[in-house]
Image: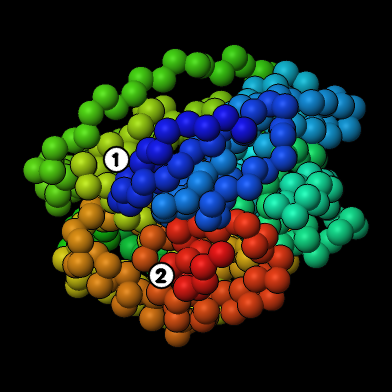
Amino acid sequence: MQADEWSTPLAWNRVHRFRQRVLAVPRGLEAVPKVTGSVLPRGFGHSYGDSCLNAGNTLLDTRRLNRILSFDPQTGVLHCEAGVTIDAVQRYAAPYGWRLAVSPSTGLASVAGCVAHDVHGRNHVMAGSFGHHLLAVELMRSDGYHGVCGPGEDEQLFRATVGGMGLTGLITTVKLQLRPVKSSFIDVETHQHTELSALMAHIEASADSHEHATAWLDLTSRRAFRGVLEIGNDAVGGGSFSPSRFRPRMPFDLPRWCVGRPHAQAFNAAYFWLQGRRRPGRVSYQKYLYQMDSLGDWNRLLGPKGFYQYHFLIPAAAVNDGLPRLLEAVRRSDNVVVLAILKRYGPAPAPGMMSFPVRGLGGAFDFVHRGERTTRLFRELDELMIELGGRVYLAKDSTLSPGAFSSMYPQWTDFRAYVDPGFSSSLWRRVTGEEP
Ligand SMILES: Cc1cc2nc3c(=O)[nH]c(=O)nc-3n(C[C@H](O)[C@H](O)[C@H](O)COP(=O)(O)OP(=O)(O)OC[C@H]3O[C@@H](n4cnc5c(N)ncnc54)[C@H](O)[C@@H]3O)c2cc1C
């Protein structure tokens, strides 16, 4: 291990400012060092909250573990190191007619980060989550264990590691089953809606016919409802394309006075107007899946204090009652939601003990950071989620209390047995109160 300076690495929401010691894991992969306090593996810090932070302790930066070790174009089995990005896997496999079966909406996450949160995409109903497509995960633990777990091999450790938030050990390599595709394109159509019930019915009706689906809601207006459903299927033709590497970056934090309701309203109105002009068409997987990556560091658009995302999931049976109540609570609270997305989740049994998805409807709402006013609302929403049998996604969380966490993830007491005693995170200490 190579010692670097103490620094203040951020999570994607840029809210927490914790000093942490960062050790870069070298390609040679020496054993996890004995360090004072706890360690936490870290990929690209694209988790929104403190699951990728370890305040006052050590982060193991895995970005140098970036080699694709093997790929079989006949079977679509890819073996890579932990720090390889989702984007790198897609670029590598596309010319052979393969793609990741499940991807988050960013290509800039590491493969191990996607294992550790068992991430999901816009196609959860048909494809399940990231963990469903894993063949093997190689793990190093602080007691000297260095082995492989997977379906049919050390299965309980595997189930703990998928969605295990980096707490079961350092993932060093991952073996994945990719899926065959006929082109690099996705056929996409958008539908505007001015009533929530019509939008919900449309999402439901498209579940069998369209693999990919997301709905955008404008929550900046207190009057009329505005939403857009975007649905798509893999294209059959269109061939392959060369993904662009050009990516402008947001060079500075937008000043605080620019981050408020008027600006959020203008952004959402423009989005609705633009979507109304879109015709059904064929777009590259890169443009479709990774739209948000087209502006690097876009999180700086939400101002110098950072922002909060509330990413919730309401089980299917409670959606009709729960979603309008949640939207009403948000409206009443006088908080500003810049971006609100809904996704549906399918029935596949979760591959990880701490996996987020269950069958139902989820939403990811980006809130302007208004301090106590925002966190007070989140506490209210947490109570509603608990009443509905829902939960909050730990990859995006910054505020869950230990009580709310235990209610949403009661299985954590079983999971705890697999946590490496040398590992911890800011999130884990916050939601369990447990010190390593
Ligand atoms: C724009 C954007 C869109 C997103 N869209 C989605 C989405 O659609 N669906 C979704 O599910 N998520 C989504 N996410 C969340 C993101 O996919 C996850 O948070 C993912 O874990 C980030 O990967 P990372 O490499 O940045 O990991 P980090 O954020 O650095 O770490 C995440 C977790 O992985 C663990 N970890 C990292 N590397 C290792 C390793 N080598 N061994 C063991 N544990 C490790 C860390 O300890 C931590 O607990 C999105 C994030 C962004 C910024």
- The three-letter code of the residue at mark 2 reads Leu
- Residue displayed at 47% across by 73% down: 433
State which quarter of the image contains the N terminus: top right
Please name the residue that numbered disc 1 is placed on: 271
Label total for image: 2
Against 393, residue 368 (above or below) is above
Residue 114 picture location, percent across and down: 61, 46
Going from the N terminus, do you reach mark 1 or mark 2 first?
A: 1
For the point 48% across and 66% down, which residue is it?
A: 429
Q: Residue at x 31, y 48 (%)?
A: 17
342 vs 240, left or right, is: left
Q: Which residue is mark 2?
A: 400
> Outermost residue, bottom direction?
387
Where 291 sits versus 392, above or below? above
Q: State the quadrant of the C terminus.
A: bottom right
Question: On the rendered structure, is 232 left or right of 240?
Answer: left
Asked if residue 305 shows in the view, the reply is yes
For label 1, the SS is: helix
Query: Closer to us: mark 1 or mark 2?
Result: 2
Q: Is mark 1 within 8 Å of ligand 1?
A: no
Badge 1 amino acid: Tyr
Q: Nearer the viewer, residue 61 or 184?
A: 61
Badge 1: how crowded within 10 Å, few (<14), some, or many (20+)? some
Q: Residue at x 55, y 58 (%)?
A: 424
Dot 2 crowding, Cα within 10 Å, few <14, some 14–19, many 20+: some
Q: Secondary structure at mark 2?
A: loop
Q: Relative to 250, say whether 316 is above or below.
A: below
Q: Say which of 172 and 411 sits in front.
A: 172
